[in-house]
Image: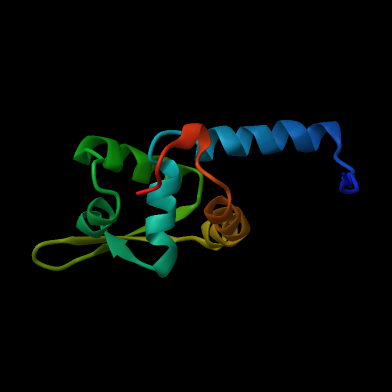
Amino acid sequence: MTRSKPVHFVVADDDCRDFQSVLEFIGRRWVGAVLMAGAQGARRFTEYRALAPGISDRLLAQRLKELESYQLLRREVIPSTPVQILYTPSPTGAALIAALQPLIAWSRSVPPAGGDQRP
């Protein structure tokens, strides 16, 4: 039996705390799905709802506001009849989405936990 070489990372104590904070935010219910729904650019509320089936309107509105307050999404009001509101990833949000891409790819290669089937 051959053992793989351990991977060593240099991680400062502050890095652990900051990383945990980010993971806790992204891991909140529907935050990741809403963030990823905006990965292709500007979308309206109904488009986010369609890309995150099962989320309530109230929770979607709350998550969009949170992502905006963390400066991960930008909200743009387009004066028209009816008024249109677009949510677009900010440069910081786009950088986070890009940083999550390897994790998404990794998740596809790992068997689901507990023998659950992937949808």
The figure's colour scheme reads: rainbow
Residue 33: give x, y in percent of width and height: 40, 48
Left or right side of 50 for 1: right
Q: Is residue 113 visible to us here?
A: yes
- The residue closer to the viewer here, 85 or 48, is 48
- The residue closer to the viewer here, 37 or 45, is 37
User: Which image quadrant for residue 77?
Assistant: bottom left
Find the residue positioned furthest to the front: 1
Residue 118: give x, y in percent of width and height: 40, 47
User: Which image quadrant for residue 56?
Assistant: top left
Find the residue positioned furthest to the left: 81
Residue 29's place in the image compared with 41, above or below, is above
| Residue at the spot 87% in from the left edge and 48% down from the top edge | 4
Left or right side of 99 for 93: left
Left or right side of 19 for 34: left
| Residue at the spot 44% in from the left edge and 63% down from the top edge | 39
- Which quadrant would the N terminus be assigned to in this image? top right
- The residue closer to the viewer here, 93 or 97, is 97
| Residue at the spot 51% in from the left edge and 44% down from the top edge | 70
Residue 102: give x, y in percent of width and height: 62, 59
Q: Is residue 74 visible to us here?
A: no
Residue 51: give x, y in percent of width and height: 29, 56
Circle count: 0
